[in-house]
Amino acid sequence: QRLPFRLLTCQGTVAADLRGGERPSGSVETGSEDKTPKKRFSELQQERREQAQRSVLIHCPDKISEKKFLKYLSQHGPINNHFFYESFGLYAVVEFCQKDSINSLQNGTVTPSLRTEAAIPFRSRFFNLKLRSPSNQTSEQSSVQPNNQSPPSSKKLLESLCYAESVDEQLNTLLRAWQLTEESTRLRYLTCSLVEDMAAAYFPGCAVRPFGSSVNTFGKLGCDLDMFMDLDHIGKLDSHKNAGKFLVEYQVKNVPSERIATQKILSVIGECLDHFGPGCVGVQKILNARCPLVRFSHQASGFQCDLTTNNRIALKSSELLYIYGALDSRVRALVFSVRCWARAHSVTSSIPGTWITNFALTLMVIFFLQRRSPPVLPTLDFLKTLAGAEDKCIIEGNNCTFVRDLNKIKPSENTETLELLLKEFFEYFGNFAFNKNSISIRQGREQNKPDSSPLHIQNPFETSLNISRNVSQGQLQKFVDLARESAWILEQEGVDHPSPSHNQPWGLAALLVSSLASGKSSSGKKRRRPASERVKSLLESIRGPSADANADGKRTLS
Ligand code: GTP
Ligand code: MG
């Protein structure tokens, strides 16, 4: 029987038409409270990785019958899960029940023959599905429903914040609107898995793992995809193989340092992605950075990817943040709001510069939550005391040990509301002695600053390093001014607006639209107009036709 579709492998080179964020489909998540992950980070990574290895990515015709599509693919084996999303075309992620189905699919797939260009015949898990006879199929079929997973527009988000009943609800609304969906997470692991297939051509047995905000529970729709190429398990001995009179080693090439080895490996993988990687465009090798990386855009998923290797500490940091994010449902809500607030006021940016990074902001929130009485979060040193022998972890001489089983950590006795915590966060950092103190989530208390950098946040694992050494005095001052302003607004709101209003930004919404650029300085309360008046005029400004414009970088919430 002649099948209605023909599969072609996607070619290595595609016109560079880059996008910043992803737009896959997504289902509605129910919020932070009932979705708190409780699995160990390593278990979750393993499960997701295995799921991704059974999955394929398919570029589909714009109009396609879902039923026929699934029937066609099921000839290779049962399908466990699938979804469609749009990103300059219609794509499907299909997860088979068994890995073997992918071999079957690949065996029935052809490499396209082109008239004017030559295809590089790389057999990936990224396919192009074509209709054999487009005209008679499009008429009968119902198109699929790709779920839209893009983050909400600033205007829409502000509206839903205004309709919330309380500041606590506002923080949870923001979290729900912006957290990574199941589909985005699947697509992130699949993208790593596709890159792993390429890297494995050089280094069989390597693993490409996502880290950073894609996996640390603080990821926002559209955030970049940080990848770590793990070569550590290649050629490591199992203890049972370590018996006998001889030891066999691989013959290897040696280079003068780890850094040079990392640069050489990334250079080759970068070339490979650039020349043969279907959908990998805009490949840049940034090998002289402190942490060498290959940056590229994965067109089909829309992800901006940063690939590193020899970066095990960053993966451990992601695991630590994962634990903090999963411990208490208030943590993620607070971190999302603070990050969003910082972005709305250009206190942070995704491009490198002298501003405070998202990672630094996250550590500041964690530190603040450790300082509450009773604490909302335990210190890293305390998590170390709970660690068992199996948790022991030393990376490049740094002790990275902490308990990894979430169930061994007692829940906090602190019952403060998100509203109070948000206000206190701004109060706390609005008055923090940045000139003499350093922030350490390891000890959970201020330390004397070891150097003169304006902002000192101790690297949790490489404790002599400052993760915010890039921050200038000017950027820090901007953060402090805004924090004071925001604390003041939240305080005034209690007085000015006893009940939430649907007509003007209040609570978190007021913080996101308020701006020092509106001509006010935070230091003198006397110079202000009443909050209600300022907020009203700001609402007018966001209601205008340029509500979502971000040309001045001040009002954008994304
Ligand atoms: P996004 O802004 O959503 O991408 O947040 P992110 O946490 O993924 O940050 P980013 O992509 O900049 O960095 C990825 C990961 O690298 C972070 O989660 C940290 O684990 C680590 N990282 C980033 N910046 C630093 C730094 O200055 N020092 C150290 N030690 N690790 C860092
Ligand atoms: Mg990142």
Image (spheres, rainbow, N blue to C red):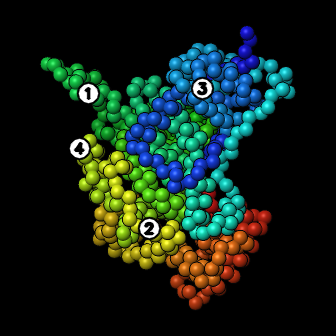
Residue corresponding to mark 3: 79
Residue 443 image-quadrant placement: bottom left
Q: Nearer the viewer, residue 452 or 244?
A: 244
| Disc assigned to residue 237 | 1
Amino acid type, residue under disc 1 in the picture: Leu
Name the N-terminal-most of marks 3 and 2. 3
User: Rounded to the nearest whole Å, what is the CA distance between mark 1 and mark 3?
Assistant: 36 Å
Amino acid type, residue under disc 2 in the picture: Thr
Q: Quarter holding the C terminus?
A: bottom right
Q: Is residue 496 left or right of residue 272?
A: right
Q: Nearer the viewer, residue 505 or 234?
A: 505
User: Rounded to the nearest whole Å, what is the CA distance between mark 1 and mark 4?
Assistant: 20 Å
Say if 285 sits above or below 195 in the image: below
Q: Which residue is located at x 39 percent, y 48 percent?
A: 319
Furthest residue toward left = 245
Q: Which residue is located at x 67 percent, y 71 percent?
A: 505
Residue corresponding to mark 2: 415
Which type of secondary structure does the marked residue at label 2 adopt? loop
